[in-house]
Amino acid sequence: MRVIGIDPGVPGAAVVLDDLGAVDLVVTWRACSRGYRLDHYSAPGREVVAGVDVTGWREVVDILPGRPSALGAYLAGLLSAAPPVAVAVEDVWLGRNLKTTVSLARHGTGTAAALEELAGVAAVYVQASTWRAGVLGLRRGARREQCKAAALRYMPSLCRGLDLAYAAVGDLDHVADAAGIALWMQREIRRRER
């Protein structure tokens, strides 16, 4: 089953895993003066995504409007030929800065909306501590820095092709997190099917 995991926010990332849990597509974004700048990576042998040849190279798009809905629509367009069966988004937690929490929540839901329509299912929002415990075996009270380092280090061994994506777009912690979120979603679906 093809799933997409999203680490929302800016910068952020989306990772699509194929039926076997291998990386199909990675899209990263960060803020630029005109909106979002995006980098793509597609696994070898996956030459075309929505009519665009993206195999193993980076495409920089620095004119995407800086709205989460535009980002979601863009991702949905890339995946329209082979929609995911599930959309998983890292949920926010209430920290010291309420403004940041609200901003992240809006960004996550704005990005996920178009993907929900494409997949025909509601997005699943998962706490970081939940997917990290399920995928990486980290305890729920682990420090954020430890969790990010563990994801960067261990996710390539859990998702075939993630090391190649790192080489293309950089070993960014939000890519590792998005892959972990997608893998958690795949495991949850399989667990529920039993």
Image: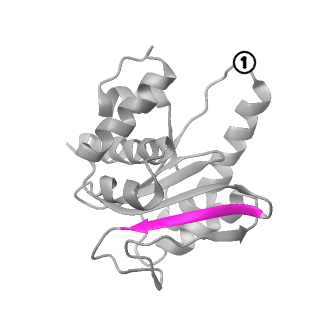
Q: Quadrant of the N terminus?
A: bottom left
Q: Is residue 59 magenta?
A: no
Q: What kind of colouring is applied to the model shown?
A: one colour
Residue 134 in the image: state x and y as whole percent: 32, 30
Q: Residue furthest bottom?
A: 51
The answer to whether residue 11 is visible is yes
Secondary element at image label 1: loop
Residue 46 in the image: state x and y as whole percent: 32, 76
The answer to whether residue 122 is visible is no
18 vs 150: above or below:
below
Q: How many marks?
A: 1
The answer to whether 66 appears left or right of 165 in the picture is right
How would you classify the magenta stretch by its main secondary structure?
strand
Amino acid at the residue labelled 1 = Arg
Q: Nearer the viewer, residue 155 or 7?
A: 155
Q: Quadrant of the C terminus?
A: top left
47 vs 14: above or below:
below
* Stretch in magenta: 35-42
Residue 190 in the image: state x and y as whole percent: 25, 46
The answer to whether 63 appears left or right of 1 in the picture is right
Residue that appears at 45% across and 13% down: 141
> Which quadrant holds residue 57?
bottom left
Residue that appears at 65% across and 48% down: 109
Q: Is residue 41 magenta?
A: yes
Residue that appears at 74% across and 34% down: 102
Residue labelled with disc 1: 96
157 vs 51: above or below:
above
Residue 182 in the image: state x and y as whole percent: 39, 48
